[in-house]
Image (cartoon, rainbow, N blue to C red):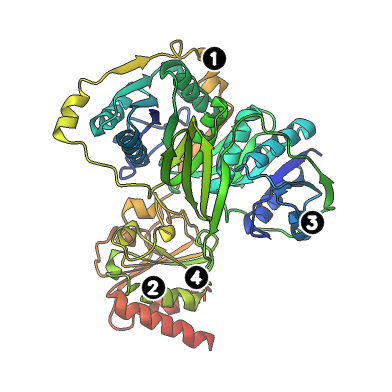
Amino acid sequence: MNIVVLVKQVPDTYSERKLSGSDHTLDRDATDAVLDEINERAVEAALQLKEAHDGEVTVVTVGPDRATDAIRKALSMGADTAVHLSDEALHGSCAVQTAKALAAVITKTTGEFDLVLAGNEASDGGTAAVPAMVADLLGVPVLTHAREITVDGSSITVRRETDDGMTHLRAELPAVVSVGEKINEPRYPSFKGIMTAKKKPVSAITLADAGLDPSEVGLATATSTVTSSQPKPPKSAGEKITDEGDGGAKIAAFLVAQKLI
Amino acid sequence: MAEVLVLVDHLEGEVKKTTYELLTAARTLGEPSAVLVGTPGTAAKLADGLTKHGAEKIYVAESESTDFLSPEVSVLAALVESTSPAAVLIAASADGKEIAGRLAVRTSSALLGDVVAVGADTMTHSIFGGAYIAESRSNTAHPVITLRSGSIEIEATAGAGAEETVEVPAATSRSATVTSREPIVVGDRPELTEASVVVSGGRGVGSADNFGVVETLADSLGAAVGASRAAVDSGYYPHQFQVGQTGKTVSPQLYIALGISGAIQHRAGMQTSKTIIVVNKDPDAPIFEIADFGVVGDLFSVTPQLSDEIAKRKS
C-alpha cells in the first residue's frame, strides 16, 4: 500500500499563541512549534496499515523551513520518506489555497497513492475541512473522523465517530481518510527510529516543483483576508473565598445576586 | 435582495437548533433560502419549522442515495450556480465543515470557517480557544461560511416558505457510502455545546463513581455535564463530554468547574463562558485566574451543599 500522511507543524497548545500585528497571520516565532498531536495519530494509523498490508508511508507537509522538525518526528516514528513544500510565496495562504497546494504535491511527487491519511482537525485552525477539500480536488472519496480503519483488498471501511454518533462508511481506494482523537495511541519513537530518521530521504520542493504558480497561493490572491485581529482582553479574577463550611451556600448567594438561579 | 443559502442541519426527522441560528444570521446578508437534503418525506416534517424561522424559500432535494454527504455538496453546488447567492451558511458541525470545504473547492469560493458573528461584510472568528478575536472578509463571490453553534440569538420571524423541488445531480466522482448508522444515545441532559449552563469535573473528582456529585449539581441546574481531559484520560467520564482544546468548545452563560486545575488545554474550551464558578482544593490552581467566583475547598462538601441550596430555592 502506498500511503501518504499529511502533517502540519503547529504552535504548541501549551504555549501562548498569537497572530502577528502586520498581516494577521500566525506569529510562528512567538511559540514553540510541534507536530500536531492529531497528526501523530494519523502517522500511527499509517504505520499500522503498513505493518498489516506492506507498502510505503510518505509524509507530506506544506510549511516554513522549520516544519522539518515535524517531519523528523514522523520519520522517527517509522514513516519512510517525506516531501516538504516550502516557499516564501505560500505565506498567508487560505484554506482553499493550502488544499490546492497539498493536492498538487500529492499528485506530482508521491506517485500513485492508495490512501491519504490526515488528522481531522488542526489544533491551530478550526476550519477542519482541509482533508475533505484535498479529496475533492483529487476526485477521490473522503472518509473523515475515523475511529477505526479497515482495508480489505481494494476497499476501505471506516467507523466514523462524531457528536451525532457512529457512521459506518465504505469506499473504494484510492481515498482520503482523516483520523479522530480516539483512533489509537501513537507510538513513541525508539532510539533506533530517531537515529535512522536522520538518514531518511526528505525531498524539499518549491512551488514550481509541485507545478504551481506563485500567483495561485499566498496572501495576495487568498480567497479570504483577515482584516483585524486582537487578543481578547484577559478575564480578571473575581472574588475568591476559602470554604468554612458554607462554600456551597455562598456560591448559591452569588448566583442569585447575578440572577443566574 | 440576493438569496442566502442555508443548509438545513437535521437528524432523525428533527431540525437542529443550529439551523434556526443560521436562518437568523442569513438575514444580515440577504433573503434566507433553506436547502433541505434528505430522504423522501423529510420536507413534510421540517418545512413548518423552517418557514416559522424565516425561510423565504425551501429547496427540497430528497433521495434514497447512500452516498455520504456528496448529495449535500452537489445540490448546494448546483444552487450556487443557478442562484448566485450572497453566501452559503452551514453549521460548523463535523458534517457541516466537511460539506463546506468540498463546496468551497467546487464553487471556487472563500471558506470562512467557525464564525461566531455574521456582519454585512466581515465575519468574526474566535480563535485559539477564545484567546483571540479575528475578523475576516471574503474575496470571492458566494463565500461558504460555517457558523459555530450557540453564537446567534434565534429570532423567529416567519418567512414565505415557498417550497421548490430540486434534483440531486448525478455524482461526478466516487463517493464514500453509508453502510449503517448508530445514532448517539441522547440522555436527558442538554447537549454540551448548546447548554446555557455547564458543570464540569476534573481530576479532583477522583473516580468515575464520584462523578455522581457533578451530575447531581448539573441536574439541579438543568445543565450539561463536562469533563477535563485529565478526567477523561483517567477514565472518569466518556470522551464525548471532554471540554478543551482537543474536545468541545463551550461558551455558556454559567460554567462551574469542580476539581479542575485549569491547564491551558482546558481553558481553551471554556474561557469565553460568561460567568465562571470554581471549586478547587488548591488555592494556587490557575483556574482561579479566570473565575468570577472561586471557592478554595473540598468539592465533595461544597458541591452537595450547593445542589441542596438550589433545590431549596426551586421548591
Position of the N terminus of chain B, as image quadrant, is: top right
Q: Quadrant of residue B225 in the image?
A: bottom left
Point out the tag, 2 or 4, that comes first from the N-terminus: 2
- In this rendered view, identify the residue nearer to me: B66 or B168: B66
Residue at the disc numbered 3? B51
Residue at the disc numbered 4? B223
Q: Quadrant of residue A240 in the image?
A: bottom left
Q: Is residue A215 above or below residue B285?
A: above
Helix, strand or loop for disc 2: helix
Q: Position of residue B129 (x, y in %)?
A: 43, 48
Q: Amino acid at mark 1?
A: Ser
- Asked if badges 2 and 4 are on one and the same chain, I answer yes
Q: Amino acid at mark 3?
A: Thr
- Look at the numbered discs 3 and 2 and tell me whether their residues touch, using CB distance below 8 Å: no
Residue ID at (48%, 85%): B311
Q: Is residue A26 above or below residue B198?
A: above
Q: Is residue A201 left or right of residue B89?
A: left
Q: Position of residue A3 (x, y in %)?
A: 39, 29
Tag of residue B214: 2
Residue B92 in sight here? no
